[in-house]
Amino acid sequence: MKKIFSLQLCVWLFLTILFSQCTKVDLEEGVRKTTILRHNYIAITTKDDIPGEVEVHYSILGNNGQNEVKTERFHTNIAANRKYIHV
């Protein structure tokens, strides 16, 4: 009985000392994963190549590092190349 109690006490002390040396790892909160796409191609056409007009809303990377929404009107058939989209 004394041996079991001594063994339990030693195990308890060992585990207490072992876990008291553990440190909490701080996780990074609010990590944002973003990338900047270098090209974003837009192709617009109409059926039977009949001329038409479209309004396109797109985002570009502004001076402050945030996306800025732009609006343009195009006459079809067009192919527009918009650069630096922040995703």
Image (cartoon, rainbow, N blue to C red):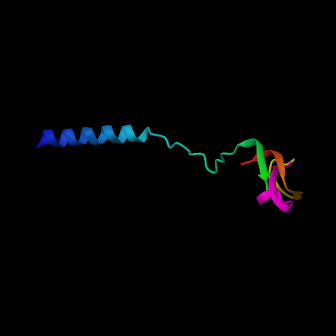
Identify the residue shown where x is 61% and y is 50%. 29
What is the total number of numbered labels drawn onto the structure image? 0
**The N terminus: image quadrant:** top left
Identify the residue shown where x is 31% and y is 37%. 14
State whether residue 86 appears in this view: yes
Identify the residue shown where x is 44% and y is 39%. 22
Residue lying farthest to the front in this orientation = 48
> Where is residue 53, by image quadrant?
bottom right
Query: x, y (%) of residue 6?
Result: 19, 39
Query: x, y (%) of residue 7?
Result: 20, 38
State whether residue 46 appears in this view: no
Q: In this view, does 83 lie to the left or right of 15?
A: right
Q: What stretch is highlighted in magenta?
A: 47-62
Q: In this orientation, which residue lies closer to the viewer: 23 or 6?
A: 23
Q: In this orientation, which residue lies closer to the viewer: 40 or 6?
A: 40
Q: In this orientation, which residue lies closer to the viewer: 8 or 75?
A: 75
> Where is residue 9, by image quadrant?
top left
Query: x, y (%) of residue 50?
Result: 84, 60
Identify the residue shown where x is 84% and y is 53%. 77
Residue 74 in the image: above or below residue 28: below
Q: In this orientation, which residue lies closer to the viewer: 17 or 60?
A: 60
Q: Is residue 11 left or right of residue 56?
A: left
| Residue 51: in magenta span | yes
Query: x, y (%) of residue 49?
Result: 81, 56
| Residue 48: in magenta span | yes
Q: Is residue 32 left or right of residue 17?
A: right
